[in-house]
C-alpha cells in the first residue's frame, strides 16, 4: 500500500522535477544511494548483538531492536521499490536517448532482456551457494558485503555513464 502511494507521488510530482533541476547524474544516483543508506541502517540492526548503540536507538523509538529492524527493513523495501519503479526506470530510459535507433534497440534489448535475467538468476544462484555452506543468519555479513559492493559498483557505473552522456541531454 505505502509502496504504491510513494511510487505514485514520486512519479507524478518528483521524478521529472529532479531530472529537470538537478540533472541526470544526480537523479540516477538517488536509487543506489537510498539503497545504500537504508542497507547501512538495516544490517547493523540485524547483525547487532544488543550493542549499546542498538539498545539506545531502540529505547529512543520506544521499541525492541527486532521491531526496529523490521520497521527499517519495511521502509527499505518501500523506498527501494518506489525509487526503482520511478526514478531508476526514468533515468535508465534517458540514458538511451543520445544513441542512434539501432544501437538504442540493441542496448535496450540487452539490458532489459538479458541483463535483468542474468542479475536475478545470478543472485538466486549466489544465495543457494551461500546457503549450502552456512545458515541464513550466518550469511548476513556476507550478504552485507555483497550488497555494499554491488551498490558502490552501481554508483561508480552511473558516474562513468554520466560522463558519456552529452551535456544537452543530461
Image: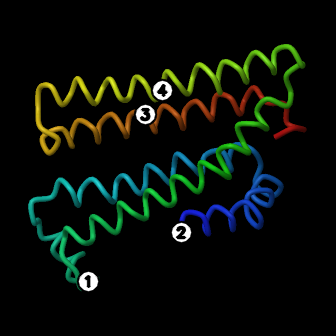
Residue position for label 3: 150
Color encoding of the figure: rainbow
The part of the image, by quadrant, that contains residue 70 is bottom left
Few, some or many C-alpha atoms within 10 Å of disc 4 (few <14, some 14-19, many ≥20)?
Answer: few
- The quadrant in which the C terminus is found is top right
Residue 1's disc number? 2
- For the residues marked 2 and 4, what is the alpha-carbon distance in whole angstroms? 27 Å
The part of the image, by quadrant, that contains residue 149 is top left
Residue under the image location 20 percent in, 67 percent down: 66
- Using the image, determine if residue 4 lies above or below residue 31: below
- For the residues marked 3 and 1, what is the alpha-carbon distance in whole angstroms? 32 Å
- Using the image, determine if residue 83 lies above or below residue 160: below
Assign a secondary structure to mark 4: helix
Number of marks in picture: 4
From the top left corner, tell me how far across and down residue 135 is, in percent.
12, 37
Q: Nearer the viewer, residue 6 or 16?
A: 6
- For the residues marked 3 and 4, what is the alpha-carbon distance in whole angstroms? 11 Å
- The mark that comes first in sequence, 3 or 4, is 4
- The mark that comes first in sequence, 2 or 3, is 2
Residue under the image location 48 percent in, 26 percent down: 119
Residue position for label 1: 60
Q: Are marks 2 and 3 in contact (CB under 8 Å)?
A: no
From the top left corner, tell me how far across and down residue 100 is, in percent.
89, 19
Residue 119's disc number? 4
- For the residues marked 1 and 4, what is the alpha-carbon distance in whole angstroms? 39 Å
Amino acid at each position: 500500500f505505502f509502496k504504491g502511494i510513494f511510487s505514485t507521488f514520486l512519479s507524478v510530482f518528483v521524478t521529472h522535477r529532479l531530472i529537470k533541476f538537478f540533472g541526470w547524474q544526480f537523479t540516477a544516483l538517488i536509487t543506489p544511494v537510498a539503497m545504500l543508506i537504508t542497507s547501512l541502517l538495516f544490517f547493523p540492526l540485524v547483525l547487532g548483538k544488543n550493542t549499546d548503540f542498538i539498545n539506545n536507538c531502540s529505547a529512543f523509538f520506544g521499541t525492541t531492536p527486532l521491531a526496529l529492524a523490521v520497521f527499517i527493513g519495511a521502509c527499505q523495501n518501500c523506498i527501494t521499490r518506489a525509487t526503482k519503479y520511478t526514478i531508476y526506470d526514468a533515468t535508465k530510459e534517458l540514458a538511451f536517448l543520445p544513441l542512434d535507433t539501432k544501437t538504442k534497440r540493441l542496448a535496450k534489448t540487452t539490458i532489459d532482456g538479458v541483463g535483468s535475467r542474468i542479475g536475478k538468476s545470478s543472485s538466486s544462484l549466489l544465495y543457494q551457494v551461500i546457503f549450502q555452506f552456512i545458515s541464513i543468519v550466518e550469511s548476513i555479513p556476507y550478504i552485507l558485503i555483497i550488497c555494499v559492493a554491488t551498490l558502490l559498483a552501481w554508483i561508480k557505473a552511473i558516474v562513468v555513464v554520466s560522463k558519456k552522456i552529452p551535456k544537452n541531454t543530461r
